[in-house]
Image (tube, rainbow, N blue to C red):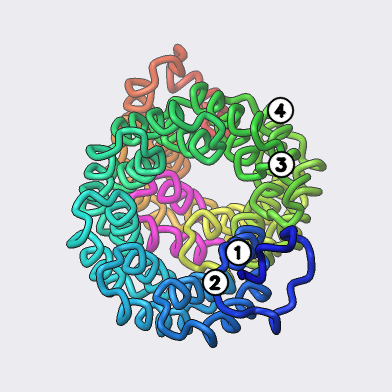
């Protein structure tokens, strides 16, 4: 008579392992399955080990032990028991698939794929084997091979929703954005409550510049998972991209409700306030961003720009220097430092910073021009002329360098050359032209050149 025939089984009762006469009881197997399904892997493992004592040649038990060890994150140990299971039952394709998943989790992708292929030898249309093989290809960034596997899955089973999701992901990474959207759409048709699919759709639409549609997708994701901070963050980015900065700020603020350590959200809040000219609010949020991430040179740049616009040049300079220490190849930091030194009247000091800008960004015609202006203010006219000419080499249809050259020529009493440069500037920018006769109106010309 079976021991379990006379008792009423309750999965929540304490189980006495010492009473197990063997694993042939269906109730014992149910107990193991229940414990695994409810995440009670330690208890399941104890029961399996006890059962193995009575059934040491059960492939199914070794398989269950391996899966349970995986559930505990002990993937290295699980491989031994998958191999024991396979030694007893070498034709069980489920064992090969689960072993492949364990190997994949250990980063052994090639070995994982060998096991998926072995499973397919026994079951040529096994969608789980193809799907997991695709995941291993995906993790090795072999996206086309991954797509081939996922396409095989949906050929066999057109309702295998996760395969469409993964194809959407792979097509995104290979810049096939329309195909990415098509596959996310197919996934959503089968699984409309997958907030990650709605979110990823938004990411792809955002990359296509379809910001309003992206916002719709993020909002669908958020209707399913309100505390999805990344969706709030990227929704904020989409609003900012179409100039709706206050809406963007609202989204960023929702993002930090659910992820209070997101320095980038605070940075973007600050940037939006900066664009709105609300420098006090911007400073408050740049402070938070820097406190959370002292290595964010962009936040030092942003905070420095706030101080610059508030005429707090010493504080601006300090922040630009802090940013440069973190990233000395960021030309905008050097440029802002140069302009700040210039604003402080430290024109000689600004030259080194302008020079560094041009080293990093030699085609920056505005920096070339400003460098020339610094030389002009120091009355180093020859060097000033050199850089005004370089600015015009880069951007010929720009009036400002011609005006500066005209100013130098007039100040050095080279009147004809000054008039030539002035007329060239008026030709490039006709809206500036005013009637003059140099002999009578030279003071008006100089006033215009100085104050324009």
126, above or below 41, in the image: above
| Residue 303 placement (x, y as % from top left) | 70, 52
Q: Can residue 388 be seen in this view?
A: yes
Rendering coords of residue 115 (x, y %) = 27, 69
Q: Are marks 3 and 2 in contact (CB under 8 Å)?
A: no
Find residue 249 and report its horizontal and vertical position in percent: 71, 34
Local SS, label 2: helix
- Position of 303 with respect to 416 (left or right) is right
**Which of 19 and 275 lies nearest the eye of the viewer?**
19
Of badges 4 and 2, the one in the foreground is 2
Query: Whole-Å distance between the Cαs marked 4 and 3?
Result: 20 Å
Q: Which residue has dot 1 on it?
A: 36
In the figure, residue 160 lies in which quadrant? Answer: top left
Residue stretch rendered in magenta on the structure: 348-374
- Which residue matches tag 4? 246
Q: How much space separates mark 4 and mark 1, taking CA atoms? A: 48 Å
Q: Residue furthest front?
A: 1
The question of residue 45 being in magenta is answered with: no
Callout in the foreground (3, 1): 1
Q: Are marks 2 and 1 in contact (CB under 8 Å)?
A: yes
- Badge 1, how many Cα within 10 Å: few under 14, some, many 20+? some
| Element marked by disc 4 | helix
Number of residues whose C-alpha sits closer than 10 Å to that of mark 3, classed few (under 14), some (14–19) or many (20 or more): some
> Which of 117 and 229 lies nearest the eye of the viewer?
117
Question: What is the secondary structure assignment of the residue under circle 3?
Answer: loop
Residue on which the image places disc 2? 68
Q: Name the residue under label 3.
A: 227
CA gap between label 3 and label 1 equals: 29 Å
Residue 396 quadrant: top left
Which residue is situated farthest in the top direction here?
435
Is most of the magenta stretch helix, strand or loop? helix
Label 3 vs label 2, nearer the camera: 2
């Amino acid at each position: 008579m079976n021991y379990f025939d006379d008792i009423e089984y309750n999965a929540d009762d304490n189980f006495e392992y010492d009473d197990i006469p063997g694993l042939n009881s269906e109730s014992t197997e149910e107990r193991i399955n229940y414990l695994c399904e409810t995440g009670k892997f330690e208890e399941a493992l104890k029961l399996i080990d006890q059962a193995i004592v009575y059934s040491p040649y059960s492939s199914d038990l070794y398989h269950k032990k391996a899966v349970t060890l995986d559930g505990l994150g002990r993937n290295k140990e699980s491989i031994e028991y998958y191999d024991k299971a396979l030694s007893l039952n070498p034709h069980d394709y489920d064992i090969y698939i689960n072993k492949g998943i364990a190997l994949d989790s250990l980063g052994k992708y090639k070995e994982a794929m060998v096991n998926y292929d072995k499973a397919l030898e026994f079951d040529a249309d096994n969608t789980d084997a193809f799907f997991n093989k695709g995941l291993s290809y995906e993790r090795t960034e072999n996206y086309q091979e991954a797509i081939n596997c996922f396409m095989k899955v949906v050929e066999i089973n057109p309702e295998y929703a996760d395969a469409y999701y993964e194809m959407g992901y792979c097509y995104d990474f290979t810049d096939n954005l329309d195909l990415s959207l098509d596959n996310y759409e197919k996934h959503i048709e089968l699984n409309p409550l997958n907030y990650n699919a709605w979110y990823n759709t938004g990411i792809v639409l955002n990359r296509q510049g379809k910001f309003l549609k992206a916002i719709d997708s993020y909002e669908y994701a958020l209707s399913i998972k309100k505390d999805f901070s990344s969706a709030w963050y990227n929704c904020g980015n989409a609003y900012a991209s179409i100039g709706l900065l206050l809406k963007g700020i609202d989204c960023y603020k929702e993002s930090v409700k659910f992820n209070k350590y997101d320095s980038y959200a605070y940075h973007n809040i600050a940037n939006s306030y900066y664009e709105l000219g609300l420098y006090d609010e911007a400073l408050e949020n740049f402070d938070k961003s820097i406190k959370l991430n002292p290595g964010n040179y962009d936040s030092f740049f942003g905070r420095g720009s706030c101080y610059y616009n508030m005429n707090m040049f010493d504080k601006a300079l300090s922040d630009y220097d802090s940013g440069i220490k973190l990233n000395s190849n960021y030309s905008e930091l050097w440029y802002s430092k140069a302009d700040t030194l210039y604003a402080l009247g430290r024109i000689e000091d600004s030259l080194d910073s302008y020079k560094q800008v041009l080293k990093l960004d030699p085609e920056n015609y505005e920096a070339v021009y400003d460098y020339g202006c610094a030389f002009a203010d120091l009355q180093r006219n020859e060097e000033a002329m050199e850089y005004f000419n370089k600015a015009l080499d880069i951007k010929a249809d720009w009036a400002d360098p011609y005006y500066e050259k005209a100013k130098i020529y007039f100040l050095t009493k080279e009147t004809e050359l000054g008039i030539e440069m002035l007329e060239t500037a008026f030709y490039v920018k006709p809206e500036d032209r005013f009637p003059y006769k140099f002999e009578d109106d030279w003071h008006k010309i100089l006033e215009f050149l100085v104050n324009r």
